Amino acid sequence: MVTIIGAGLSGLATAFRLQQAKLPFTILEASEVAGGRVQAALVSGQAHSGHQDLGPSWVWPYAQPVVEEWLEELQINTFDQYDRGDALVDRSPDTNAVAQFLPGQNGIARIEGGVHAVVSALLKQLPDISYRHEVISCSFNKSNIEVDVVVNGASKIVSSDKLVIAIPPRLTVPLISSTPELRTVSDILSQTPTWMAPHAKVVMFYDHAFWRERGLSGRVASQVGPLVEIHDHCGPQGSPAALFGFSGVPAAQRATAGSGFIDAVQQQLRRCFGDDAPPPTQIIIKDWALEKFVSTEADITGSGAHPSVIDEAVRGQHSNNRLWFAASETSPFSPGLIEGALARADQVAAQIIASF
Ligand SMILES: Cc1cc2nc3c(=O)[nH]c(=O)nc-3n(C[C@H](O)[C@H](O)[C@H](O)COP(=O)(O)OP(=O)(O)OC[C@H]3O[C@@H](n4cnc5c(N)ncnc54)[C@H](O)[C@@H]3O)c2cc1C
């Protein structure tokens, strides 16, 4: 039996491969839903029903062969990120943004149904996941591996032969810190930031994509904020109509801003798109810094820099070929990205299958 800790993309994709190989596994997930950093808001209402990504939105299929293969296998289509027309450059809080051409969006693709569609497709193929199962420690015994799980406040031990830890790097550290042989790996993981953990994504819904009608791409590059960049986030045919932006306000300031943050976003939208632009019908803020199964204090106060490829030691053989680390940040390429999660899942699953 293989225990997989974490039902994010990397854990689910590992499970999917083990399932194809007819190997037994169980998935323990701390939160109430699968997907990890891949989350979507299901918005209903005539003008904008459908899923809207609150985590990742983009893939780069031309440069990400692993993503391309997985999407093909799961029969999921992509479409180009909308980028027709001028962008807006937002330079000062006192003047309106200026329309101009901005390069840099070529080859960016969105996934039909959102990245969430990948999670849904994987879940359809997998057996039930044990939700609200937070793993707090792991013991590597001679005959088995025991993980200590908290379920509804009560402690429970889950035993298995092999273990895949598919949770963000710094959250992995307390699970393995009592095992002296894993000290080096633990040190490396403690210094590995979780991609996007300190950030907040803001999705703004509209009745229609008015910016497209005005010859604008929906993209804003801002030196003022609170959103440092804004992009078109409509569905494939322009519906549901939406924009999304990333907050430039640090997590600590966001935590105390209250409704001031949304007010500042509304003000920025008026500055960029004009006073005559329709206001959003709904705004959703997803603050990833508040997600305890994604972010740690070190991530929130860190630089937020994109993780680089971590030391090979993490991908080496551990505990007599019984333990693997699978989170996206542990991938040898595209660490921190969707491609990293899927590529690392492929690697880990292949090694597990070979070990049986
Ligand atoms: C706002 C945002 C925008 C992004 N944009 C992009 C993008 O455009 N393109 C791109 O390629 N990537 C993007 N990413 C990154 C992408 O989302 C991640 O690379 C990918 O989702 C990571 O998957 P994962 O399975 O490795 O980890 P996670 O998604 O973090 O999954 C880990 C899972 O483990 C669970 N867990 C944690 N601790 C425990 C525990 N103790 N016990 C049990 N379960 C536990 C968590 O609840 C979670 O479900 C973005 C991320 C965010 C947040």
Image (spheres, helix red, strand yellow):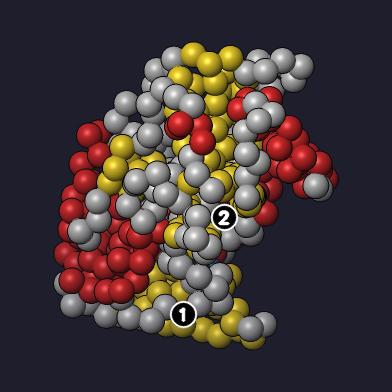
Does residue 225 appear anywhere in the picture? no
Residue 83: image quadrant is top left
Q: Whole-percent x and y of residue 111?
A: 33, 49
The amino acid beneath tag 2 is Val
Tag shown at residue 152: none
Position of the N terminus, as image quadrant, is: bottom left
Residue 86: image quadrant is top left
Residue 266, placed above or below residue 170:
above
Asked if the residues shown at circle 2 and circle 1 are in contact, with their CB atoms under 8 angstroms apart, the answer is: no
Q: Whole-percent x and y of residue 311?
A: 40, 39
Report the residue marked by disc 1: 130
Q: Whole-percent x and y of residue 170?
A: 56, 51
Q: Residue at x 73, y 43 (%)?
A: 262
Q: In the image, 138: left or right of 342?
A: right
Residue 301: image quadrant is top right
Mark 2 CB in 8 Å range of ligand 1? Answer: yes
Tag shown at residue 294: 2
The amino acid beneath tag 1 is Ser
Q: Residue at x 36, y 36 (%)?
A: 81
